[in-house]
Amino acid sequence: MNEVITLGQGNIVGQQGFSEELFSRWAGFIDGSPKTVDTYTRAVRQFAYFLQEQGIRQPQRQDVMAFRDSIARTHKPTTTQSYLMAVKQFFKWTAQEGLYPNIADHVKSAKLDRGFKKDYLTSRQVSKTLAGIDRDSLRGKRDYAIMSLMVTTGLRTIEVVRADVGDMRTVADFTALYIQGKGHLEKTDYVKVVPEAEEAIREYLQARGKTAATDPLFESIAHRNTGGRMTTRSVSRIAKERMVSAGLDSDRLTAHSLRHTTATLNLLNGGTPQETMQLLRHSNLNTTLIYSHALERAKNNSEQRVAKAIFG
């Protein structure tokens, strides 16, 4: 039996790695969504495989660091950080349970570039992308409505997928879409739907026919899922295909670029960092300030001033 040995006996790793009983107890401890539980468990399993391959029965701090470095060689910094965070939470738990000391405490995370990995679109590029969508078909009406909504509100793909027809409601003197935001279990927040996006959504819904309040706001038209809820992958694919059709073919342009576009255009047109933070529903102003700092550099015309001094 692959036994989990307590702190007093020294080992936590059996001959076959961590036991399933340990994983089960660990998963029960994680306070998060099923996706979070799966992500954290998968990361800790990867750590267990690493220890098993190295023949390590009593892991120490340097083994956690070696695991971090091995992941960093083949994965992005954000993935490395996610894996390490899971391992750190795991050993925090083992210490609390008296199973094994917290050997991952104070292990430094992967260094992340604070800039954004994706580009944004200019207002002209957004207009060109939207204008290139043929709205005569149901698919075209749907895609235009999705793109218009995302680029004016900064919605994430998961928020688009979770939206229901009944989430379109009146607030004060405008139409709002109530959303289930990142890390939330209920639809307690909302975004303002500008008239142009609302008109596109209403036109799409009218073409769709009779709908119920609990129906997805945007339906799938895939053969295997016609009328069902779309996936984040399908929303991402729509955004990518529509940008490519407009001649915007770049690895740095994805569905998430629409969210970056929302923030950037808001700041460029007089929006404050605080307003942009509320618009994007960031929990930390520093995240929003990354946009602001990037724009400050873009507006810095030092190179032109130096060139003028040299070349006249």
Image (spheres, rainbow, N blue to C red):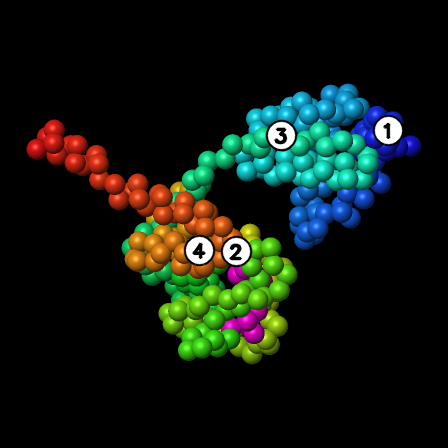
Residue for point 51% across, 53% down: 283
Residue that numbered label 3 is attached to? 107
Residue 161 in magenta stretch? yes
Residue that numbered label 4 is attached to? 277
Q: Secondary structure at mark 4?
A: helix
Does residue 103 appear anywhere in the picture?
Answer: yes
Task: Please identify the quadrant where the N terminus is shown.
Answer: top right
Q: Secondary structure at mark 3?
A: loop
Residue 103, percent from left and from top: 71, 29
Magenta residues: mostly which secondary structure? helix
Front residue (pair 9, 246): 9
Closer to the chain start, of discs 4 and 3, is: 3
Residue that numbered label 2 is attached to? 157
> Taking 18 as reference, is 232 left or right?
left
Compared with residue 189, is residue 292 higher up or lower down, i.e. above or below? Answer: above
Q: Point out the stretch of residues depicted in magenta.
A: 157-168
Q: CA distance from mark 1 to mark 2?
A: 48 Å
Q: CA distance from mark 4 to mark 3?
A: 31 Å
> Taking 153 as reference, is 16 left or right?
right
Q: Of the residues tagged 3 and 2, which is closer to the observer? A: 3
Closer to the chain start, of discs 2 and 4, is: 2
